[in-house]
Image (cartoon, helix red, strand yellow):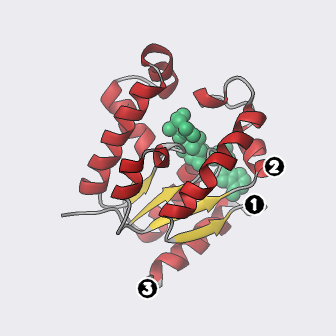
Amino acid sequence: MTAPVCVLVGPPGAGKTTVGQLVAAALGVPFTDADAEIEAVAGKPIPEIFIDDGEEHFRTLERSAVATALGTFTGVLALGGGAILAEETRERLAGHTVVYLSVELADAAKRVGLGAGRPLLALNPRATLKHLLDQRRPLYEEVATIVVATDGRTPEEVAAEVTTALRKPIR
Ligand SMILES: Nc1ncnc2c1ncn2[C@@H]1O[C@H](COP(=O)(O)OP(=O)(O)OP(=O)(O)O)[C@@H](O)[C@H]1O
Ligand SMILES: O=C(O)C1=C[C@@H](O)[C@@H](O)[C@H](O)C1
Ligand SMILES: [Mg+2]
């Protein structure tokens, strides 16, 4: 059975995709993004899945894509921001090295801007982000084995801390 080297979780704008690519390059392993795997299976971009098929269908595709990646992918795996909403996914994450990239509202809002390409943030990005952060923080904390704060730090600084933490033995 193969497993990811680590799984990155965190809200939109935490930097999972950006930092994940840097960590994978530093470790010399592949990177993949569960969002990209879902788009490949659906044959269309995430905003179109939300419009054509609805969020519930997207979440079904997401649970399946994450289960497949956790069982087959060896490298750095970034999950979509809402993947941890599914209890099934939180349970699957047990036993994996899960890095929570935390971010507070101010930096998250700056990084996602107007929420382009993020269907959940299309209407009122800042208010929605605040709600998502408040709702999901306990869930990210529940699955995390490593927590790295990203506020006021560059992707390179965050990636260096993640890489160092991954090289240390953890619980
Ligand atoms: N530490 C950081 N400092 C400043 N900007 C950052 C940082 N990390 C990421 N960014 C920028 O913020 C934006 C969002 O980053 P990214 O797409 O990696 O977030 P994400 O966590 O993958 O979001 P999503 O859940 O929507 O996929 C990008 O433009 C990226 O360049
Ligand atoms: O925060 C979320 O619920 C989402 C985040 C993105 O990564 C995508 O998975 C999708 O836009 C939903
Ligand atoms: Mg991303």
Kindly give the residue lying farthest to the left in the view shown.
1
Q: Which mark is residue 106?
A: 2
**SS for dot 3:** loop
- Distance, label 1 to label 2, CA atoms, is 9 Å
Compared to residue 21, the image places residue 41 above or below, namely: above
Residue 104, given in percent of the width and then of the height, sits at: 75, 54
Residue 147, given in percent of the width and then of the height, sits at: 59, 69
The three-letter code of the residue at mark 3 reads Pro
The three-letter code of the residue at mark 2 reads Ala
Report the number of discs: 3
The three-letter code of the residue at mark 1 reads Asp
Q: Which mark is residue 93?
A: none
Compared to residue 102, the image places residue 36 above or below, namely: above
- Distance, label 3 to label 1, CA atoms, is 25 Å
In this image, 92 relative to 159: left or right?
A: left
Residue occupied by mark 3: 169
Which residue occupies the foreground of this view, 113 or 132? 132
In this image, 118 relative to 151: left or right?
A: left
- Could you classify mark 2 by the number of other residues whose Cα lies within 10 Å: few (under 14), some (14-19), or many (20 or more)? few
Compared to residue 149, the image places residue 126 above or below, namely: above
Q: Residue at x 46, y 20 (%)?
A: 54
- Could you classify mark 3 by the number of other residues whose Cα lies within 10 Å: few (under 14), some (14-19), or many (20 or more)? few
Quadrant holding the C terminus: bottom left
Residue occupied by mark 1: 151
**SS for dot 2:** helix
CB of mark 1 within 8 Å of CB of mark 2? yes
Compared to residue 55, the image places residue 23 above or below, namely: below
In which image quadrant can residue 125 be found? top right
Q: Residue at x 59, y 72 (%)?
A: 160
- Could you classify mark 1 by the number of other residues whose Cα lies within 10 Å: few (under 14), some (14-19), or many (20 or more)? some
